[in-house]
Amino acid sequence: MFVREKANDEYGNTMGYVFVGEGNLKEYYGSKPMSIKWELNEPMPHYLWKDAAKLRIG
């Protein structure tokens, strides 16, 4: 799974994706926006926890 916090930085440059690991689709629901739950095969690397915590909703 590759993730990024937002599409562009403060200067309008495209942000890169970060590989957090392989995962499987757990569930999905809704539309516009669609909500998706993933389950990673391995725990997320510890150095990504701080940034990932602010992305989690619900």
Image (cartoon, grey):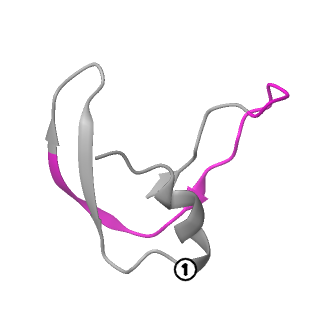
Quarter of the image holding residue 31?
top left
Compared across the picture, whether 41 is left or right of 45 comes to left
Compared across the picture, whether 25 is left or right of 3 comes to left
Quarter of the image holding residue 14?
top right
Q: Which residues are magenta?
A: 9-27
Report the front residue among 30 and 41. 30
Compared across the picture, whether 53 is left or right of 24 comes to right
Compared across the picture, whether 53 is left or right of 8 comes to left
Quarter of the image holding residue 13?
top right
Q: Position of residue 29 (x, y in %)?
A: 14, 35
Residue located 51% across and 59% down the image: 52
| Residue at the disc numbered 1 | 46
Residue located 58% across and 44% down the image: 5
Q: Is residue 4 above or below residue 8?
A: below
Q: Position of residue 45 (x, y in %)?
A: 52, 78
Dot 1 surroundings within 10 Å: few (below 14), some, or many (20 or more)?
few
Q: Most prominent secondary structure in the magenta stretch?
A: loop
Q: Is residue 28 magenta?
A: no
Q: Position of residue 8 (x, y in %)?
A: 70, 31
Q: Is residue 3 above or below residue 30?
A: below
Question: Quadrant where the N terminus lies?
Answer: bottom left
Mark 1 belongs to which amino acid? His
Q: Is residue 26 magenta?
A: yes
Q: Is residue 17 above or below residue 15?
A: below
- Give the residue furthest to the top: 32
